[in-house]
Amino acid sequence: MVLGSGATALIQLGTMSIKQIQNLILDMDGVLWHGNRPVPGLPDFFDQIAALGLRWVFATNNSSKTRQQYVSKFGGMGVTIDPNQVMTSAVATGHYMQDAIPAGSNVYILGGDGLHESMSEAGFHVLARDDYQTPAAAVVAGLNLETTYADMSIATLQIRNHGAKFIGSNADSTYPTERGLLPGAGAVLSSIETATDQKPIVVGKPFPIMYQQALKLLGDGATLTNTAMVGDRLNTDVAGAKGVGMRSVLVMSGITQPADLEASEMKPDFVMSGILELAAELAKVHK
């Protein structure tokens, strides 16, 4: 059953026919690139699925970048996208926060540009990076490659001293780069949880809001039955898709390894080596 190194044959584990897939929700890290290195054939993949008349959007747990920064990153890899095709855990967290705390509240952000932009767009007042005296209604944490001990200290003080809610954009323990696996947002959340004895409320995959918002981005005609989540993680991409009743495609180009798939009780509908194989399989049924 396990897809070994270098294998290209599609493995079908669910009952869904691949012909039912009309829309794709694509994870990014480990699926489309590793750090700043695109997977082989990235522009060709998008040319092929566009030629098939399929629609796609992106849903990433990485909250460090803004939508426009992702547009630039894709452009540097030879792919043109619209910012409205991008759903990040930062954007999803902004939607969640609008229901969780009053508009205009102070928030302290332990994260990157994506979270700063989404919190501002959602109508919250973002405190200065070194402000531990002004009470925050929430500490919003995610991945930031420049996070320091001082940043974590202020987040801790906001939660302990001012009773700020503890919100996490996602809990991915690692993320894949061209150098290998590096600490993800989950590592940041764990540090703050250890220091505050408070568990975060986590918004990103596998929780439903990311999938619901991605379906909205796809537009009319996109349903749970004709849309598939394409990702590299069993515990987020696949688990979340199953949780909302959506089909899933696991690509073996990122986090999940063959032994992980073999040992897991959770199985995706399809397993493929990477996105080029996905395009090839879709081409067989969407001619």
Image (spheres, rainbow, N blue to C red):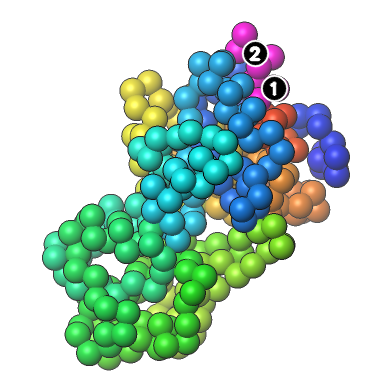
Residue under label 2, please give it. Answer: 285
Contact flag, marks 2 and 1 (Cβ < 8 Å): yes
Rendered view: 219 above or below 109: above
Residue 18 % position (x, y) = 63, 22
Number of numbered discs on residues:
2
Left or right of residue 233: residue 12? right
Q: Mark 1 falls on what kind of element? A: helix
Query: Mark 1: which amino acid?
Result: Glu
The C terminus lies in quadrant: top right
Q: Mark 2 falls on what kind of element? A: helix
Which residue, as the protein is rendered here, is positioned at the far top? 287
Query: Mark 2: which amino acid?
Result: Val
Give the residue displayed 44% in from the left and 43% down from the top: 71
Residue under label 1, please give it. Answer: 281
Q: Main secondary structure of the magenta part?
A: helix
User: In the image, is residue 85 part of the stretch drawn in magenta?
Assistant: no
Give the residue displayed 39% in from the left and 47% down from the top: 68
